[in-house]
Image: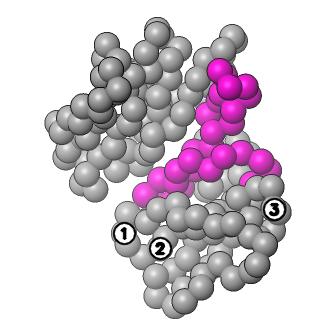
């Protein structure tokens, strides 16, 4: 079954809903320059456009389908992260990494409880650290720092386990906690 028919489009899998009833795909069918986000029902494959993308890089969607993380490179050394509350009608991207100078930010994903976005940044030193952004309060806190770049942080579906990867001198050290 081809869920993204068309000859000139690109598509990708974004993720599953936490309840397993939906999944999300990105597609350039509307605009060759931007990946829009579609939600598909597992039963029957009914689809709905949930985000018409004005030109961001789609990074992740929360398990409850409410939050969308968008990355926006400004230069090769500078980038931003935006979030979209899909429960709001306007779907306006909100910048969560306002800064000056060259600072890299990149989304790692949402926590299983849908309360925080985990992201990486070199804002606080030479190496990329993992930080959490509280979606309710806007508070930011460090989740993981290491003497090397934190490459990723992800969680088991229940949130009981956290898996992180640190690029330690060109060797990825994976930790389960």
The answer to whether 123 is drawn above or below residue 31 in the figure is: above
Residue mark closest to the camera, 1 vs 3: 3
The answer to whether 160 is drawn above or below residue 23 in the figure is: above
Q: Which residue is mark 2?
A: 22
- Write down the region rendered in magenta: 53-81
Q: Mark 1 and 2 residues: CB-CB less than 8 Å, in contact?
A: yes
Residue 31's x, y, as percent? Answer: 82, 63
Pick the front one: 170 or 53: 170
Residue at the (65%, 78%) spot, across then down: 4
Residue at the (76%, 78%) spot, across then down: 7
Q: Which residue is mark 1?
A: 19
Quadrant position of residue 51: bottom right
- The span from disc 1 to disc 3 (Cα, nearest Å) is 31 Å
Q: Which residue is mark 3?
A: 32
The answer to whether 111 is drawn above or below residue 149 in the figure is: below
The answer to whether residue 69 is seen in the rendering is yes
Residue 170 part of the magenta segment: no
């Amino acid at each position: 079954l081809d869920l993204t028919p068309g000859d000139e489009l690109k598509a990708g899998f974004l993720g599953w809903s936490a309840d397993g009833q939906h999944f999300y795909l990105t597609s350039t069918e509307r605009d060759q320059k931007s990946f829009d986000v579609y939600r598909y029902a597992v039963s029957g494959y009914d689809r709905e456009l949930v985000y018409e993308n004005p030109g961001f890089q789609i990074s992740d969607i929360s398990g409850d389908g409410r939050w969308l993380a968008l990355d926006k490179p400004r230069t090769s050394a500078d980038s931003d992260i935006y979030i979209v509350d899909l429960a709001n009608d306007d779907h306006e991207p909100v910048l969560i990494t306002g800064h000056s100078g060259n600072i890299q930010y990149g989304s790692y994903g949402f926590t299983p409880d849908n309360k925080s976005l985990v992201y990486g940044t070199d804002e606080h030193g030479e190496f990329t650290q993992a930080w959490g952004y509280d979606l309710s309060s806007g508070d930011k806190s460090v989740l993981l720092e290491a003497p090397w770049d934190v490459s990723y942080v992800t969680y088991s579906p229940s949130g009981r386990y956290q898996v992180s990867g640190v690029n330690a001198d060109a060797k990825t050290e994976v930790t389960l906690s």
